Image: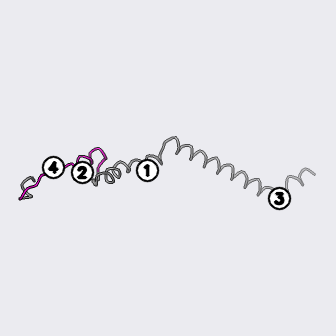
């Protein structure tokens, strides 16, 4: 009689599917936590933002502090008959 119950395969697919879902969910949660701890996504966004901020503020592809010094508004505003005189 015990052999009859052991050879029944009706619920094995469900058990294996649930087991696979649990394993995949565990891997997914572990990888999300690892990404949060390493702050990979924030580095991915904030790294290029340094030079983009310089371009937005001053029109120069450099970090914002260095780009402010190169903004055209910081040049001397002198008038001259010969524009090449000061360059």
Instruction: Return the disc, 2 or 4, that comes first in the chain's sequence.
Output: 2
Foreground mark, 3 or 1?
1
Element assignment for label 4: loop
Q: What separation in Å lies between label 3 and label 4 (alpha carbons)?
A: 85 Å
**Which residue does the numbered mark 3 point to in the structure image?**
10
Q: Which residue, given by chain and number where applicable, does mark 2 sit on? A: 71
Q: Which residue is mark 1?
A: 45
Report how far apart the C-alphas of labels 2 and 4 lie in the structure.
11 Å
Does the magenta portion include 12? no
Q: Secondary structure at mark 3?
A: loop
Pair 4/1: label in front: 4
Q: Which residues are magenta?
A: 62-81
| Residue at mark 4 to residue at mark 1: CA–CA distance | 36 Å
- For marks 3 and 2, give the one nearer the viewer: 2
The residue identified by callout 4 is 76
Label 3 and label 2: CA atoms lie apart by 74 Å
SS at badge 1:
helix
**Pair 1/2: label in front:** 2
Q: Are marks 3 and 4 in contact (CB under 8 Å)?
A: no
Q: Residues within 10 Å of mark 1 (few under 14, many from 20)?
A: few
Residue 66 lies, in percent from the top left, at 26, 45
Mark closer to the chain start, 3 or 1: 3
Residue at left 76%, top 53%?
15
Pointer 4 local density, CA inside 10 Å: few below 14, some 14–19, many at least 20: few
Tell me which label, 3 or 2, sits earlier in the chain: 3
Residue sitting at 52 percent across and 40 percent down? Answer: 37
Nearer-N-terminus badge (1/2) = 1
């Amino acid at each position: 009689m015990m052999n009859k119950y052991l050879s029944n395969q009706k619920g094995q697919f469900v058990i294996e599917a649930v087991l696979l879902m649990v394993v995949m969910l565990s891997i997914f949660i572990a990888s999300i936590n690892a990404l949060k701890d390493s702050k990979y996504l924030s580095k991915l966004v904030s790294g290029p933002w340094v030079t983009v901020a310089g371009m937005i503020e001053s029109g120069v592809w450099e970090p914002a502090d260095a780009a402010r010094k190169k903004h055209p508004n910081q040049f001397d505003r002198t008038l001259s008959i010969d524009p090449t005189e000061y360059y």
